[in-house]
Amino acid sequence: MWPEAQIRNVMPLLTAETFSLQFNNRWRRRRQVKGPYYPRRTYLCYQLTPQNGSMPTRGYFENEKNRHAEICFIDEIESMGLDKTQCYEVTCYLTWSPCPSCAQKLAAFTKAQVHLNLRIFASRLYYHWRSSYQKGLQLLWESQIPVEVMGLPEFTDCWENFVDHGKPPPFNPSEKLQELGEKSRSIKRRLEKIKSRFVDDLETGLRSLQLGPGSPSSSKSDWR
């Protein structure tokens, strides 16, 4: 019988078309789309790597009707019965960054699974202009879960390890990956702005703890 990690590695793979459509990071509005419209779903590809050198475990999930991909991922990891005396690196590639509810559940999950070191890379930011979604990202950072935007290295790793290469894709993979990497730059800038606000708020909170309540005049100086 195969070791458990090898059994779990026998998994379905994304089609090249699914990768191209769902990890596409080009900004668009429905009325601006040329050709047939397709919904952008949430896909989560994960790789769990034991630090003892054992074979990594890979898999992917997509949103179900009443269950987000992140929750499917959490349930899958919890069902593995991992050795809590071992440490594991977990990398997730998401088509959309987590919603506030999933951010809370991921934070609680990593708090309970202290032997896991989770990193999240997202192709696109979900409702990044809304305060509640920004607070969800901030909660993940506070919980020591790095959330970054996928760049060329991450798109390449996702393409190589989670996509079925059994037949030639209807596009040039190298050109597609380069395009995704270039489009990610503006999304990274958006995330950096959210992160800078988080750092500013954190520093302001630390100063308040050190200095105590400020005077009315000092409070006004914090406004921009």
Image (cartoon, rainbow, N blue to C red):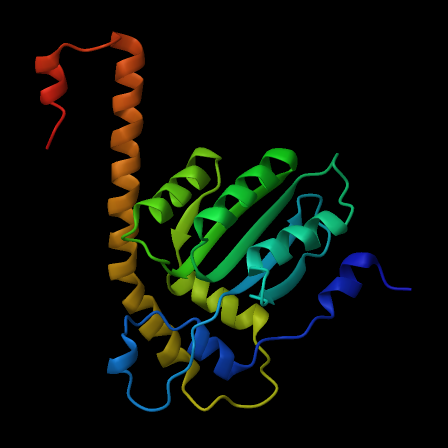
In this rendering, the answer to whether 155 lies above or below 132 is below
Q: Which residue is more in the foreground, 7 or 25?
A: 25
In this view, the residue in front, 174 or 26, is: 26
Image side of residue 105 versus residue 28, left or right: right
> Is residue 57 among what the camera can see?
yes
Residue that appears at 64% across and 64% down: 59
Q: Quadrant of the N terminus?
A: bottom right
Q: Which residue is pictured at 28% across the width and 88% down the height?
A: 34
Q: In this image, 157 relative to 49: left or right? A: left
* Residue 138 in which image quadrant: top left
Q: Is any atom of residue 114 visible in this view? A: no
- At 59% from the left edge and 34% from the top edge, which residue is drawn? 111
Asked whether, in this view, residue 93 is left or right of residue 33, the answer is: right
Q: Horizontal and vertical percent for residue 8?
A: 75, 63
- Where is residue 90 shown, x and y percent of the image? 59, 49
Q: At 44% from the left edge and 47% from the top edge, which residue is drawn? A: 100
Residue 123 placement: quadrant: bottom left
Residue situated furthest front in the rendering: 66
